[in-house]
Image (spheres, rainbow, N blue to C red):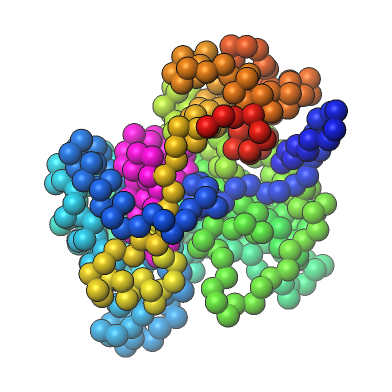
Amino acid sequence: MLDLFHNPGEFVIARCDQGVLDPNCHADTQKFHDGIGSLDLLRALRVSRQKCRPLSLNVQLPSSLKPSSCSPRDVAGEHSGIEQYLQRLEREIDLVGCHLGAEQRVEQFHLGGGTPAPAHLERLMSHLRGRFNFLNHEGGDYSVEVDLHHTDWSTMRLLRDQGFNHVSIGVPDIDADCDRSVACYQNPAPIQSLMDAARTFGFRSINVDLGFGHAWQTPDSFALKLATIIELEPDRLMVFDYARPPRRYRPVLGDKVRALCSQDDKGAMRQICFEQLLGAGYHYIGLGQFVRPDDDLAIAQERGRLRRTCEGFSRHGYCDHVGFGLGAISQIDDLYTQNTDEIERYLQQLDMKQLPTCRGWRFEAGDQIRQMVMERLACDQELDIRAIERRYGLVFSKYFSAVWPLLEQLSRDGLIELSDRFISILPAGRPEVDAICNLFEKDLGGAKH
């Protein structure tokens, strides 16, 4: 990706591979602080209810509590880890739900962290439907992450029966002890089976998560692995750097920390990724997300209806986003809140009938301007400068005076088209859209708050 350094008297654009942003959370959590707590969230929820805004719900199931790690007796037992977690999760759902209105539609829902056991899934969904207004007849976008090794056709059928219409499949890498003389990529047969199940049961889209950057990966092995996945024709691919993986792929406490490959190899893998996927007809939306041209996200982008939220790109950016579970993030108006990611603290807070909110961030006027610029540039691949100036009462080139010379350099390099009216990202700049947008996030001394 692009990295721009300000040298005295000149702006130099240097290329270095930094992977893609964390696909699990697109809020800038580095700004979060413990001055935001549960009372802030409760006030925001009440405003949401008063304005009767639609909802986007996100429920997180910790990957460390997979039923597969327990004995059958423990899975069914009252004191198993997953059972304890579900009890507190249901309590959190109730504590939050009582501050929202029954008429607020759930237009988007995401279940992340892995595939729960069928009994746990049915119990969780029953509890959620008893508290929230889920849509019928495919009216909403309801997505789920599934674990490749613990999901079969019967589970896929159950997920579809529960209303899920988008599925995300993780593609794990084999261990570092693999024979370097053989191509090190995952056998596609299990992935093919789940994709066949998803298509048979009528899921609207299939996403495949694909990581790069482990030490045992080589550009050649990654190219072969990617080509194998492309042959399966998923609707979407989420490509991420193992140096900054989504939460569900991060090692849990006690796991062995795995070595990463060199920056040169990582850069080569990233280039291979763009060459193969764009060559296969996929569009790069940004944040590591590639989609087929007939995908809902691609169509939303063409129609100017794509939004970027704390959950990534969405057709439902006008919704209030409410997160449940360990480390979950909520976004309502100008407020972000996040639950604790410490399991013991999460359980204890809910045992005391308190929300597990531990930190957050409320962006101010200057933050709103930068967020709007970054979102529209990312989602539309262009920015109407005059519209920003009229909306916020500013002169764009002066407000972003430190960024403007960098934009001029990008224009000379053929990555963007720049005028006093528009910024348009050209085809050569599409792979760098994340870095271009992030220029406006950096405090380069131009914006006045």
Which quadrant of the view contains residue 412? Answer: top right
Which quadrant of the view contains residue 108? Answer: top left
Instruction: Say if 31 sits above or below 381 in the image.
Output: below
Q: Residue at x 37, y 50 (%)?
A: 330
Q: Is residue 336 on the magenta stretch?
A: yes
Residue 242 shows in this picture: yes
Residue 52, image x and y in percent? 19, 37
Residue extending furthest toward the front? 449
Q: Left or right: where does residue 440 sit relative to residue 118?
A: right
Principal secondary structure, stretch drawn in magenta: strand
Q: Is residue 202 on the magenta stretch?
A: no
Front residue of 288/282: it is 288
Q: Left or right: where does residue 86 sit relative to residue 143?
A: left
Instruction: Say if 399 sits above or below 37 in the image.
Output: above
Q: Residue at x 40, y 83 (%)?
A: 70
Front residue of 347/87: it is 347
Residue 424, image x and y in percent? 62, 20
Picture quarter with the N terminus: top right
Q: Residue at x 39, y 77 (%)?
A: 344
Region of the chain picked out in magenta, as a range: 308-337
